[in-house]
Image (cartoon, helix red, strand yellow):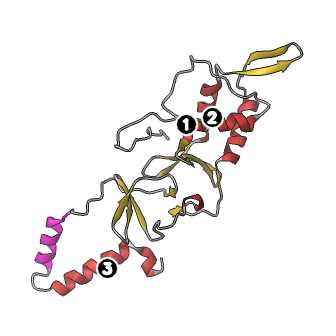
Amino acid sequence: MTVEPFYDAEHEPGPGPFDDESTDDSQEFPPPSNPMKVARQLLIPWQHGEHFTLRHWRGSWMSWERSHWAEVDDREIRSLAYRRLENATYVHMTEDGPKVKNWAPSKRKISDLLEAQASIVHLTSTVDAPSWLETAIQPGRTTGPVIACRNGLLDVTGRNLIDHDPAFFTLVAVPFDYSASADAPKWREFLTQVWPEDPDRIAALQEWFGYVDRPGDLGG
């Protein structure tokens, strides 16, 4: 899959880990013999506040797309590691003192690195989507149903819109904004045509749609 760039708080496109195609600049990394430290350095762009925006869940890589999480092909993560380390260097200690050497990524080095990276961002398989991750549980945070919209996360119970947060693990988002003042004139016109003198049926249909919107109330 092609991963879209991250977005900032104003919903404008911003740079993300997949956006840097340049391999011209040399960067110093820990040595290949310490893949955990290398992995932690590579994961720096994959962070939003205190939360990772790359996870390894149920055998797959998952990337935060701001409104939701999406699966990323293993080959894309592997390709990014090769490109990031192509011109990287590390310091090798010798009897004559420190010596700068090329990191020189290889199949074995990258495999060790990705295994270490997966262990750092591992998300237990017992986590089901949608849900708040344990590290995100805070006093006052809603435990009720949440809908990921284009402009934020909607707390269905209180009708409160909060900022997108990678701590909310969801695989689905609706492709439109939430608006508290939104209206549906065509829908209301349709209902009055079907039941022109029966507001009770209209109210009952509205209530039914409310239950569909909150499957937990039906035991689903």
Left or right: where 40 falls relative to 45: right
Q: Position of residue 172 (x, y in %)?
A: 44, 57
**Mostly what secondary structure, the magenta segment?**
helix
Establish if 145 lies above or below 174: below
Residue labelled with disc 2: 42
The magenta segment is: 183-194
Residue labelled with disc 1: 45
Left or right: where 59 falls relative to 208: right
Q: Is residue 112 visible?
A: no
Q: Residues within 10 Å of mark 1 (few under 14, many from 20)?
A: some
Left or right: where 6 falls relative to 45: left
Q: Is residue 175 magenta?
A: no
Residue drawn at (72%, 26%) of the image: 106
Residue labelled with disc 3: 208
Splitting the image into 4 quarters, where does residue 94 fall? top right
Give me the C-alpha separation between circle 1 and circle 3.
44 Å
Residue type pointed to by label 2: Leu
Residue drawn at (45%, 68%) of the image: 142
